[in-house]
Image: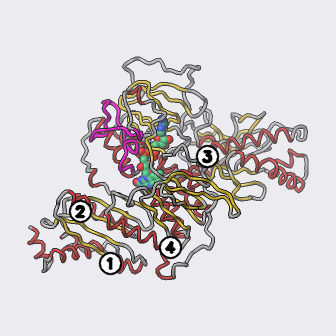
Amino acid sequence: MAATRRLAAILAADVVGYSRLMGADEEGTHERLKAHLAQLVEPKIEEHRGRVVKNTGDGLLAEFASVIEAVACAVAVQREMAERNAGIADERRITFRIGGNLGDIIVEDGDIHGDGVNIAARLEGIAEPGGICISEDAFRQVRGKVDAEFVDIGEQTLKNIARPLRVYRILPQSPLPRPPPLAGAEVNAMAEDSFDYDLLVIGSGPAGQRAAIQGAKLNKKVAIVERKAVIGGSSVNLGTIPSKTLREAALDLCGYRAREFYGASYTVKERITMQDLLFRTDQVIEHEIDVTRHQLRRNGVELIAATASFVAPNTVRLDYVEGGHSRRVKARKIVIAAGAETARDQHIAFDGKLIFTSDDVLQLDRLPRTLAVVGAGVIGCEYASIFAALGVRVTLIDRRARLLPFVDQEIVDEFCHHLRENRATLRLNESVDRLEIIEDGNGTRVRIHLDSGKTILAEKALYSVGRTGAVSQLNLAEAGLEPDSRGRLAVDDHYRTHVPNIYAVGDMIGFPALASTSMEQGRLAVCHAFGVKTHSAPERFPYGIYAVPEISMVGRNEGELTEAATPYEVGKARYKEIARGQILGDVIGLLKLIFHSESRQLLGVHIIGEGASELIHIGQAVLSFGGRIDYFIDTVFNYPTLAECYKVAAFDGINRLGILGSPDDLFKTAR
Ligand SMILES: Cc1cc2nc3c(=O)[nH]c(=O)nc-3n(C[C@H](O)[C@H](O)[C@H](O)COP(=O)(O)OP(=O)(O)OC[C@H]3O[C@@H](n4cnc5c(N)ncnc54)[C@H](O)[C@@H]3O)c2cc1C
């Protein structure tokens, strides 16, 4: 859950109010308050998966897994406070106020009361319909920051607050609506031909978001169903965004980019902790979730917090995350964008700390000194290289003979060389037999037994052997669908399954299983579903691997072209030949163009080094327009930039063809 850790609430004791309540002077109250914080409040925060991040004089700033947890914690504290204060205060019904930044939650007799000040609850959509009131103070703090409408309802007298307060009502517009009251019924009685939605999207990851927004742009009635309390899918909460932010934080803090100038031992911070790395990650995740929610809401997409399962090809049962309700909805078109889950071997004792998966990285208590990474796919390679850059001794194990089989061999060789430079050990062609947790005088560690008889000892092990489609709750059989053994659904060129009204996109359909391609698939599927023509060329999608160093590619690689018997030549540029490469201190970077040796048409671009995943888009554009490498020769790039590599590589390629002369001559030759 660390991926959803967000600054959720301030638990602040109102000292003045508290003094009155305790019938004590302010100083004595402070003492009692401190004792209460230690004995009652802090343990409750822990119980609700939160942690104190700052003491704020008369209160605590605490961070929770979600606002829901924060509210639950607040209520728990309130209840116990009420018991403790029984008989002490003249007015014991309101016992403790919670909130400052996010507004107060006022509890009476153990329940959140109607006129309570509860913006935290409102933000997560858990407040009762009918709206919630906040004080003027809270209103000022959240105005402009929260996507909601406020109505000034004038001065009100609130319990335990001496003077009347100006109060604002937040209009009910919950982002994650509760189910409509169904009087206990599970099923909506519905006419056979009536549809609740034109489009129902299952899953709020990148694929689902784009599908839903595209549907809304086509003026369709759209709902998106998400089973988790937070939207965004693996991309925002567990995968793309956290890992990329963590990478950036790691490279900044360990001074990686400056090592060429200041030496391999250069570092910006001496002892880098997981907390240092997570500080940045949490902020980015929170922002991304807010932006996504805002976008969906702005486009009029209904967000439903429920688990979806099919009961028929057009009908889906929604089991709401909260309240235990369920109902059935019918949609003309359904897009399954349920994503994928980390593959876990049942025989391995995952504890999320010693033996963990990529889902648990943000939960790690500390950076290990040694780490074994089982599985050298994209995720394994990314994390192995990030941890190696941080100075962790990494062993990367894979049963295949080479890493990243879909990447150009030369780029993979460069990557392996760099991993070894960072003291990583590669154990390829090795299968893992079992993982064992051992405890001796040196502490608790993981011993990995390989089929070859070798063993590897590490403080922690990251198990990263792939992902399988998240089909377990979808009840696909009722829709007439059957996933393959890895939980993937088969689709045609328009992302339609063999059931005409059902589409599947994103990780659910397997390779390339990227956030970038998932978004595009979502858009294309919905366009097709509603008869809108599109022009997209999946073969020219770029691929980015955010390892250290970064790798990116578009088009064909040498291996594929050799196999297809296509005559080609390559042109290369090393970053160290380019002024910008020298300025950055990236001397290992390489950009490689592959082009047809007769027509000089660009066939592929492969890059390893700083900014590879940005730089690739120049090549992608030329490739998409069927351009030749002559374009790079005839083009002026900003100087000094890494883009200049394109020009240098093009000249290198031309030289390899043995063509001499000016660019004009070259152009004529090519015609
Ligand atoms: C560590 C890591 C790093 C990555 N790095 C990159 C990267 O750098 N670049 C890149 O492009 N891609 C990257 N990816 C891949 C990227 O995250 C996925 O390709 C992308 O998230 C897939 O999007 P999706 O919408 O198909 O699925 P997801 O993002 O997984 O979203 C699916 C959603 O569906 C919900 N759901 C599932 N079943 C149900 C149900 N029955 N009812 C309701 N809701 C349901 C899930 O809770 C989830 O929120 C990375 C992945 C990982 C794990």
Q: Quadrant of the C terminus?
A: bottom left
Give the spatial CA distance, label 4 vs label 2: 32 Å
Q: Nearer the viewer, residue 486 or 603?
A: 486
Left or right of 179, for residue 409: left
Q: Mark 3 sits on what residue?
A: 66
**Is residue 301 a member of the stretch shown in magenta?**
no
In the image, what residue type sits under mark 4? Tyr
Among numbered discs 1 and 4, the one appearing first in the sequence: 4
The stretch in magenta equals: 485-513
Q: Residues within 10 Å of mark 3 (few under 14, many from 20)?
A: many
Q: Mark 4 sits on what residue?
A: 256
Vertical position of residue 297 compared to residue 657: above or below = above
In the image, what residue type sits under mark 3? Ser
Is residue 187 something one can see in this rendering? yes
Please report the residue visible at 38 percent of the width from the left and 60 percent of the height from the top.
401
In the image, what residue type sits under mark 2? Val
- Observer-side mark, 1 or 4, equals 4
Q: Mark 2 sits on what residue?
A: 622
Give the spatial CA distance, label 3 vs label 2: 45 Å
- Observer-side mark, 4 or 2, equals 4
Q: Mark 1 sits on what residue?
A: 639
Among numbered discs 4 and 2, the one appearing first in the sequence: 4
Is residue 288 something one can see in this rendering? no
Q: Residues within 10 Å of mark 4 (few under 14, many from 20)?
A: many
Please report the residue visible at 72 percent of the width from the left and 43 percent of the height from the top.
74
Magenta region, main secondary structure? loop
Q: Position of residue 161 (x, y in %)?
A: 78, 43
